[in-house]
Amino acid sequence: MAQRASFNVKQLECRAVQELLRRLADTRKIDLAQPYYVGMPHHPNHPPFLYGLSKAHGDSSFGEVSAAAESIALGGHVGTHIDALCHFSLRGKLFGGADAIGCQSYGAGIAEHHVDTIEPIFRRGILLDPAQTEQVEVLPQDFVVDAECLRRSADRAGAEILPGDIVLVRTGWARYWYEPGRFINNLRCPGINREAAEWLSGKGVFAAGSDTIAFEFVPAPRMPVHIHLLVESGIHIIEALNLETLSEEAFHEFVFVAAPLRLRGGTGSPIRPVALVSR
């Protein structure tokens, strides 16, 4: 009897997995990550992406078989990435009051709120599209996305932002990804201000992100949006996304899936986010 009950449970588990796979097969997967390439845009505070073949086909072989491999180097905040809460501090304190200097070392990184504490992300995503709201393809470099702009974009999207959501803000700057100088633009680009950040934190979002190098409006030497979200509110920031397909096809609500690398002590990590939408 016990064996039969165990068998029935396994059957049910198998059916549940098959049903989950069937549902996933019925969804469309939209890649929200930017590609890595030598010479790609990177914030000057962080190291560039470096790539080289460390073993080419023909260097060594086993009869008719050979293999190739590469070496890569990059910073945790290069390319499409997520900020851990320990990325910024205010008056020496991290989110929750941890002593920033007291919990760090060059060899081990930051002991509190590091990126390895971020679990794989499966959450509802919302696209807010200020560029379309303003009826332009790309927001100009001096455009400040304020709370009213986000409200109008949310009304246009027709989706209520709920606690735990991930809100992505499109400026159109992803179109410049293959023009590194234009994308970095001497660290001048559109983005949200602190008022808009407070509007997002008031919604209780889990993370907020955009398609620019800084998420917030820059130049902003004191980085008020990063301080408010990461340090004061415990909300992650995602940068350098590609939101063009979501915008072009008007997908304003989706399942957001991503996972950071398990970088113990890391202040950030590359991610490859995917939006799951109904076919």
Image (spheres, rainbow, N blue to C red):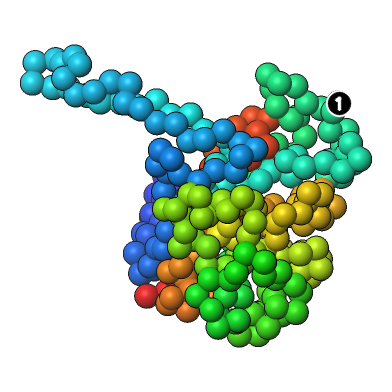
Up the image or down, 230 lies above or below 252; here it is: above
Q: Position of residue 82 (x, y in %)?
A: 61, 48
The answer to whether residue 271 is seen in the rendering is no
Place of residue 201 in the rendered image (x, y in percent of width and height, measured from the top left): 78, 64
* Left or right: 162 in relation to 67: right
Local SS, label 1: helix
| Quadrant of the rendered image containing residue 31 | bottom left
Residue 71 visible to the viewer:
yes
Residue at the extreme left:
64
> Which x, y percent locates residue 228?
82, 55
Residue drawn at 61 percent across, 36 percent down: 46
Is 123 rendered above or below residue 153? above
Residue 145: horizontal and vertical position, in percent?
70, 70
Query: Image point 60% across, 32% down: which residue?
Result: 263
Residue in view at x 68 percent, y 19 percent: 107
Mark 1 crowd level (few <14, some 14–19, many ≥20, 10 Å Cα) = few
Looking at the picture, tell me which residue is in the foreground, 121 or 24: 121
Q: What is the tally of numbered marks visible in this picture?
A: 1
Q: Nearer the viewer, residue 98 or 180?
A: 180
Please state which amino acid type lies under the numbered disc 1. Gly
Q: Is residue 252 left or right of residue 229?
A: left
Q: Residue at x 71, y 69 (%)?
A: 144
Q: Nearer the viewer, residue 91 or 252?
A: 91
Q: Quadrant of the C terminus?
A: bottom left
Residue wearing tag 1: 102
Vertically, is 56 above or below 74? above
